[in-house]
């Protein structure tokens, strides 16, 4: 099985801390190299000081990374040690011990170590190697655990923004995941039509998994995969059978795509998006879906609800899948939104230049969308059964959007797909007479109350705000945010028959 780019190899563990600036770290490494080369020449500090005409105390500061040598001094040292200047400046640590000493010195100068209030360990040749290894290892593990636990909503938004940027660059199309999904479908002989539950069971068997419906699944999970015994546990979805099918396929995705436990929230998010993509590529195979879309485009009858009905998936899944294939195979740029009835964006994607609201770090999720956009207007439409279509004139051009609303346990959401005016000719619903105008981010568009209301109520209203506590709290800790590992492990032990 090939290794897709989503399955990125684990990066080497950081050298303890990366918060110190690069210039300081280079000085530390340089000092250690000077010390190593001096000792290799069997020279004392006094010997070297006489050779270069500098006090031993100054050389000691250089070797300890506390003073940056001038270029003339570096040239003199390189001549004495009989090495090139480039080698003196850029050589890797000569030994494992030298590398560890540099890592420990960096750690002790970093803010984490200083915040602990611990005395600094004097690094010398008399420090035992096993102690050095332990100190460096402890620092690395401490940083890893703190990083794992300290993800804030802002960091989550940064990770979202970074991932969305990558998706935009690739037009939300990942051929390596398409290939993996195609291989699985070929193995079970699926050719066309909706992916049945029987075929999902065939996929499980092909991958070596057995499926188990249970009533005591840990409350923080949608499924649990037992890799030791190759079992997937899930509970029957109360929403629909389509949801159960998606959950299973996403669980298989982690296995097929070779995911390791995520090292941080960004990797967790990346893996979740990848498995969602994988599941959609199984339920709506690329070849069949592209052929379906191309026929609809030729007939100028593109519609998300037709994709939903043809492949027996949810509207949201069909909309996501359309964003995967529209640009790559139809030449259509597109944007997608999932917006809560409060106006808050929960999910978004674009490669068509639409001006989504965003904060200073480029995050869209959590922002309030313009009241005049289709994704907000649809909530006030009497007919909630049919798709609502609208043209919106914005500061960056005119866009046509189609939207529907769906209810969930957290309220009503709108799901919308939009395209620039140049592409509307391919879509059913292009003949709509609904039209709106938005000048956002200009506050006068919809964020500032009309003048008459301001005059009547400014200073006379004191709303009691609904506290959005999730905006203040840190992200749930753990490799899988919000998942109680003790609960999961106890569940697996009980169901596998282990008595540990």
Image (cartoon, rainbow, N blue to C red):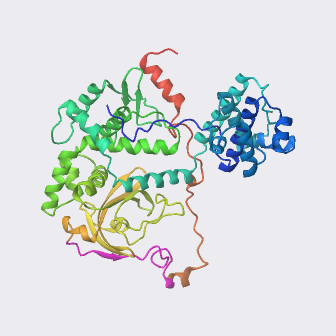
Number of disc labels: 0
The magenta stretch spans which residues? 431-452
Give the percent coordinates (x, y) of residue 286: 22, 46
Q: Confirm whether the magenta stretch covers residue 232.
A: no
Residue 256 seen in render: yes
Membership of 451 in magenta stretch: yes
Please provide percent x and percent y for residue 246. Answer: 31, 40
Q: Is residue 32 visible?
A: no
Please identify the dominant SS of the magenta region: loop
Q: Position of residue 16 (x, y in %)?
A: 65, 37
Q: Nearer the viewer, residue 396 or 220?
A: 396
Residue at (83, 32) in percent of width and height: 44
Residue located at (60% from left, 53% from top): 472
Image quadrant where residue 83 sits: top right
Q: Quadrant of the N terminus?
A: top left
- Name which residue lies at 22% across and 58% down: 330
Q: Is residue 433 left or right of residue 156?
A: left
Q: Is residue 323 above or below residue 89?
A: below
The residue closer to the viewer here, 408 or 167, is: 167
Whether residue 454 is situated above or below residue 185 in the rendered picture: below
**In front here: 346 or 167?**
167
* Residue 180 found in image quarter: top left
- Does 374 sit above or below residue 179? below
**Relative horizontal placement of residue 55, taking residue 297 as reference (left or right):** right
* x and y, in percent, of residue 406 in the image: 33, 55
Vertical side of 453 occupied by 348: above or below: above
């Amino acid at each position: 099985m090939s290794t897709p780019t989503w399955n990125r190899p684990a990066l080497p563990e950081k050298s303890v801390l990366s918060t110190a600036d690069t210039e300081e770290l280079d000085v530390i490494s340089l000092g250690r190299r000077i010390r190593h080369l001096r000792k290799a020449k069997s020279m004392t500090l006094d010997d070297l000081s006489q050779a270069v005409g500098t006090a031993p105390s100054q050389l000691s500061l250089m070797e300890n990374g506390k003073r940056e040598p001038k270029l003339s001094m570096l040239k003199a040292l390189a001549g004495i040690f009989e090495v090139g200047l480039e080698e003196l400046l850029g050589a890797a640590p000569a030994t494992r011990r030298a590398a560890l000493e540099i890592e420990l010195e960096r750690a002790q100068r970093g803010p984490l170590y200083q915040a602990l209030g611990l005395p600094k360990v004097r690094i010398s040749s008399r420090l035992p190697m096993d102690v050095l290894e332990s100190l460096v290892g402890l620092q690395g593990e401490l940083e890893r655990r703190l990083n794992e636990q300290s993800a804030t909503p802002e960091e989550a938004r940064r990770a979202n923004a970074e991932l969305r940027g990558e998706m935009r660059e690739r037009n939300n199309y990942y051929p390596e995941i398409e290939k993996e999904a195609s291989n699985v479908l070929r193995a079970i002989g699926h050719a066309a039509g909706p992916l049945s539950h029987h075929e999902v069971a065939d996929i499980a068997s092909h991958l070596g998994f057995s499926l188990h419906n249970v009533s005591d699944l840990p409350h923080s999970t949608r499924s649990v995969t037992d890799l030791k015994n190759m079992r997937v546990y899930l509970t029957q979805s109360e929403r629909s059978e389509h949801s159960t099918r998606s959950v299973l396929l996403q669980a298989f995705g982690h296995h097929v795509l070779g995911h390791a436990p995520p090292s941080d929230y960004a990797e967790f998010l990346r893996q979740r998006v990848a498995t969602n993509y994988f599941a959609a590529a199984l339920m709506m195979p690329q070849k069949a879906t592209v052929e379906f879309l191309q026929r609809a485009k030729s007939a100028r009858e593109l519609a998300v609800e037709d994709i939903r009905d043809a492949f027996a998936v949810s509207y949201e899944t069909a909309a996501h899948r359309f964003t995967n294939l529209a640009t790559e195979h139809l030449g259509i740029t597109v944007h997608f939104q999932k917006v809560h009835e409060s106006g808050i964006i929960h999910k978004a994607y674009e490669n068509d230049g639409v001006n989504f609201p965003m904060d200073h770090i480029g995050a869209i999720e959590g922002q309030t969308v313009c009241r005049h956009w289709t994704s907000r207007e649809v909530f006030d439409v009497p007919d909630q059964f049919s798709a609502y279509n609208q043209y919106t004139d914005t500061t960056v051009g005119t866009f046509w959007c189609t939207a529907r609303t769906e209810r969930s346990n957290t309220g009503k959401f709108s799901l919308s797909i939009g395209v620039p005016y140049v592409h509307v000719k391919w879509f059913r619903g292009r003949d709509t007479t609904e039209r709106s105008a938005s000048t956002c981010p200009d506050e006068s568009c919809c964020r500032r109350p009309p003048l008459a209301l301001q005059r009547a109520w400014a200073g006379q209203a004191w709303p009691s705000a609904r506290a959005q506590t999730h905006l203040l709290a840190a992200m749930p800790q753990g490799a899988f945010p919000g998942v109680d590992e003790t609960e999961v492990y106890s569940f697996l032990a009980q169901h596998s028959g282990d008595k540990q």
